[in-house]
Image (tube, helix red, strand yellow):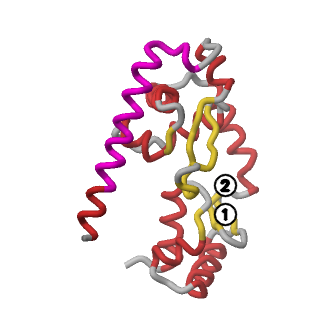
Amino acid sequence: MLTPPVAVEAILFAAGEPFEKKRLATLLAVTEAQLAKAIAELTDSLKGRGITLVETATDVELRTSPDATSLVKKLRENELARDLGKASMETLAVIAYQAGSTRGEVDWVRGVNSSTSLRTLLLRGLIEGREDPRDKRRVRYTLTTEALAHLGLARIEDLPRYEELASGARSIVAEETANASTVAADVSA
């Protein structure tokens, strides 16, 4: 069984983004005081390491430690110098043809975890993330004007077979979302 600090670390690592403390306490089935203690213990254990815990009044997140900034900067420069790989191009295509996607939608379409590809695209300024208006806990990724320029397009509608593929992609995601809601309702009934 995981100790609370280890459980917090695992969840924050997997999330890869700020995580609401109340949600974390609920997920771990601990009180806010127990969560605060686990966060403090994790913070102490990360001192002098390559990652650190960043905490606000409402959220916590694992980040690169300030001491590792120059190393991470080199990594990002190397990433930016490379061509986009197949996984990043697939991720970019999913986001483009769906006119915006959440990480879960991209993962579902690709059939694999797309976190690394999303990170690469964000670093390069090819996508941007904004709060999903339908679910404020999620981020919806969209193409930037930089992505359009990278692809040699003036507008997203200039993508090959855009109308046909975008319409199909949206209807498939909508159908799967509806199916997931039906299954969830059946399970809870």
Magenta region includes residue 169: yes
Q: Residue placed at 45% from the left, 81% from the top?
A: 29
The x, y position of residue 109, in whole percent, is: 37, 37
Q: Residue 53: name its quadrant.
A: bottom right
Q: Residue placed at 75% from the left, 56% from the top?
A: 66
Region rendered in magenta: 156-181
- Direction from residue 67 to residue 122 in the image, left or right: left
- Direction from residue 135 to residue 87 in the image, left or right: left
* Tag 2 and tag 1, C-beta contact below 8 Å: yes
Reading the image, the residue beneath label 1 is 52
Q: Specify the amino acid type for callout 2.
A: Thr
The x, y position of residue 92, in whole percent, is: 51, 29
Q: Residue placed at 45% from the left, 19% from the top?
A: 163
Cα separation, mark 2 vs mark 1, equals 6 Å
* Numbered badge on residue 64: 2
Please say if 28 is above or below 69.
Answer: below
The x, y position of residue 16, in whole percent, is: 55, 54
Q: Residue 20: name its quadrant.
A: bottom right
Please say if 11 is above or below 97.
Answer: below
Magenta region includes residue 141: no
Q: Specify the amino acid type for callout 1.
A: Thr
The x, y position of residue 39, in whole percent, is: 61, 76
